[in-house]
Amino acid sequence: MELWNHTSLSDFLLLGLFSHSPHDFFLFSLVLLASTVALASNILFLLLIQADRRLHTSMYFFLSQLSIMDLTMTATVVPKMAANFLSGRKFISRGSCAAQVFLVVMAGGAECFLMAVMAYDRYVAICHPLRYPVLMNWKACSFLALASWMGGVADSVIDVSVVFSFPYCGSLQVDHFFCEVPALLRLSCADTSLFEDLVYACCVVMLLLPLGVIVASYAWVLAAVIRMPSTEGKHKALTTCSSHLGVVGLYYGGAVLSYLQRASARTPAGDRATSIFYTIVTPMLNPLIYSLRNRDVARALRKVLGRWRV
């Protein structure tokens, strides 16, 4: 009852991930550490790209957009989760809840389209190297990045508009650590089955269309790499592409678990687990994947550290 006394009738209650047992304090510390690594590594990656002119290329421009999307995802979810856990006050206003839905869906949707853009960028760089500066000039890169963001914005506007048009006349306890669409729909006292089917269909289209571009792009890339006479050229192309494919695998692994399940097959515990994966684990691993075995990033890091020592 005390918890309810601190909330208004329009507030949601986030049940969160953990209780306050010693075991859960340890798990919370691990999650907080992973979130800190995710935020710090993405910020450092952005600073390195900005500091070194040799990283001012289309590939690193798109990687900077990926880091911004990952930062948006983690920064939207983790601070509120941590504040609620440490303070014991689990409420979130409808406005804040809508903001979480908007930002998370926007970043997730934009990232889906950006994966296809990055695959196309590698296709042009490897299969059409002479035309690459013309096809992937600053104007084209800016347009493709903006289109990715606008795709995410359109998806999030629809989700927020529809989800918060439903009446919530029963329990407002969200069995999650942030406001996610499926967790909110479970609380509605209206029939949401039609909207849930539409969301499922849209997710299938949004995931499969970019995946088709990715598969087609890398099929052409693989064919071009096989025909390369230089072993060094093959190694460089495969190293760059393997990093992107690792990130694609992480994204689609989480996306399939999160979005390509029918509402009847979803459980609150399963939703929480997959949400940790795409809001914390993936943003933590993405910059590490692109930094490992990347000579350009290592060179930029040594350059920045050398400046600080002086």
Image (tube, rainbow, N blue to C red):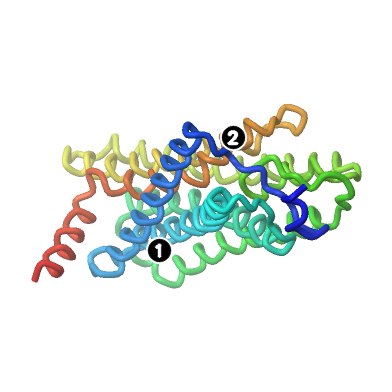
**Amino acid type for the residue under numbered disc 2:** Val
Image coords of residue 244 (percent x, y):
38, 44
Q: Position of residue 191 (x, y in %)?
A: 90, 42
In this rendering, the answer to whether 265 lies above or below 222 is above
The kind of residue tagged 1 is: Met
Q: Is residue 212 above or below residue 133?
A: above
Q: How many marks?
A: 2
Which residue sits at x=73%, y=32%? 262
Q: Is residue 61 visible?
A: yes
Q: Residue at x 47, y 39 (%)?
A: 25
Residue 94 x %, y %: 74, 60
Image side of residue 32 versus residue 49, left or right: right
Category of crowding for the residue at label 2, using alpha-carbon neighbours closer than 10 angstroms: few (below 14), some (14–19), many (at least 20)? some
Residue 141, quarter of the rendered image: bottom left
300 versus 271 height, above or below: below
Relative depth, front residue between 271 and 285: 271
Question: Residue placed at 77% from the left, 29% from the top?
Answer: 264
Give the label on residue 185, or none. Answer: none
On the rendered structure, is 181 left or right of 52? right
Label 1 SS:
loop
For this orientation, the residue located farthest to the front is: 2
Of residues 207 and 292, the one drawn nearer to the viewer in this rendering: 292
Question: Where residue 256 is drawn, which disc sits there?
Answer: 2
Residue with the mark numbered 1: 136
Q: Is residue 251 found left or right of 262 in the rendered image?
A: left
In the image, taking residue 130 as reference, residue 20 lies left or right, namely right
Return the disc, 1 or 2, that comes first in the chain's sequence.
1
Residue 295 at x, y percent in the picture: 19, 51
Q: Quadrant of residue 257?
A: top right
Foreground pick, 68 / 293? 68
Residue 281 seen from this side: no
